[in-house]
Amino acid sequence: MKIEIINQRLYIKEPPETAEGTREYLKAEFNFSEEWDEMTKTAFFRGANGDTVPRLLEEDTCTVPAEVLAASGWVGVSVSGTLGETIITTDIESFFVPATLNGGTPSDPEPTVWQQILDKVDETQQIAQSVRDDADAGKFAASPEMVERAVGVYLQTTLPPEMHRNIFRGKHLGESITAEQLTAIRDGSFEDLYVGDYWEKDNVRYRIADINYWRNVGYPESEKVQKPHILIVPDTVLGSGQMHTSNSTYGGYRNSEMKSTRLNNIAKTLPDTFKSLLLTHRMFSDGAWINASVDLMSEVMVHGTYICTDNSNKQTSDTQQLSLFRLAPELKTIGVNYWLRNVAGSQTYTLISQYGDASTDAATSTYGIRPVFAIG
């Protein structure tokens, strides 16, 4: 299949003639515009079952993963490119995979990119342990410390920091941020930190939602965020409240009771490990640049697009879907209704319902508060 990328738009020029169950046959060949030159490119395929599988491109080509062709339906394709601190992502286009008549039970799917990395790390750790044992036994001159440093250098070069936002891992990182983890954030390496990893405190999981999301964003120029940082979104609501004390959205989110009072109270209840590291940044909201720290998410951050937002209230500085919801969209739905910050009408704001749909309700309604904040 032939796919053309122009700037950030993806076009499927030659849709494939394929069927469900196809494996190690369908090739995707990409043709990129000059903006993508020298970038490390990753294609993402989303199958009819909702699973997303990444593939690193070699010479702008890859095999379409068997997992996304295992069932009939629409398969989505998008691409992400990284070069230093620059990241380009495309929109999603889809092609249809029809059902097959002969079918059969497919063999086990090939490992994902992340699983291949984990296997390599596991193999390296086993080799390192064997070498350490030999060193301890005096079989050669290298000390265990020398071996440890050598293995550490190898693991550090496994992935560039930019790729840490394109992999969902879901590892428990402890109850609070360690000194090593804070160093990995502040030096921009994000060593052993990936999207989906979480700290758990008082039965709340505080999950890494994105990395360097606000880098180079802000106004005036001197207020652009330059510090490396991670965004955190809890797996549940941290309280509840009204968007405003009257059924009016005049002045928008930036002038609401939610922004001025309720979120400040939520910020005070965060674990100390986060409160002392909060990143304040500039955010464009309701026609003006304002200071932001602990805030509600927007429709774009959750869905990757506007759905219920009023057409006159769409200008924003948060222009991308959070990697957490791009890689694990099931985490949008948490069993309760929670507010988003976009104005939907003269009396209503946007929200995510307990059933997972994009919805709206009156400003005086009481719903959950699921904030987003950054540390760095």
Image (cartoon, grey):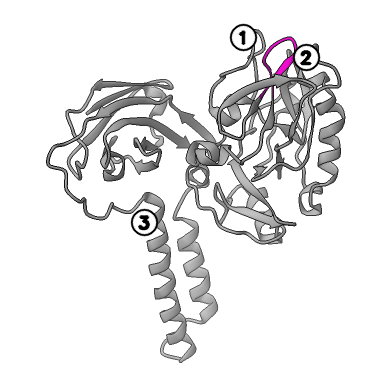
* Mark sitting on residue 116: 3
Give the quadrant of the N terminus.
Answer: top left
The kind of residue tagged 2 is: Thr
CA separation, marks 2 and 3?
50 Å
Mark 2 or 3, nearer chain start: 3
* Residue bounds of the magenta highlight: 341-350
Contact flag, marks 1 and 3 (Cβ < 8 Å): no
Say if mark 2 contacts mark 1, CB within 8 Å.
no
Left or right: 25 in relation to 114: left
Q: CA distance from mark 2 to mark 1?
A: 14 Å
| Residue 203 within the segment the image draws in magenta | no
Residue 178 visible in the picture: yes
- Describe residue 215's horizontal placement relative to residue 220 as left or right: left
SS class, disc 3? helix
Whether residue 265 is situated above or below residue 352 in the rendered picture:
below
First in sequence: mark 1 vs mark 3: 3
At x 39% / y 56%, what residue is drawn? 115
Q: Give the left or right position of residue 234, taking residue 325 as reference.
A: right
Q: Is residue 242 above or below residue 157?
A: above
Number of marks in the rendered image: 3
Mark 2 highlights which residue?
A: 249
Q: Where is residue 73 drawn, in percent x and y?
A: 30, 31
Q: Is residue 141 visible?
A: no
Mark drawn on residue 311: 1
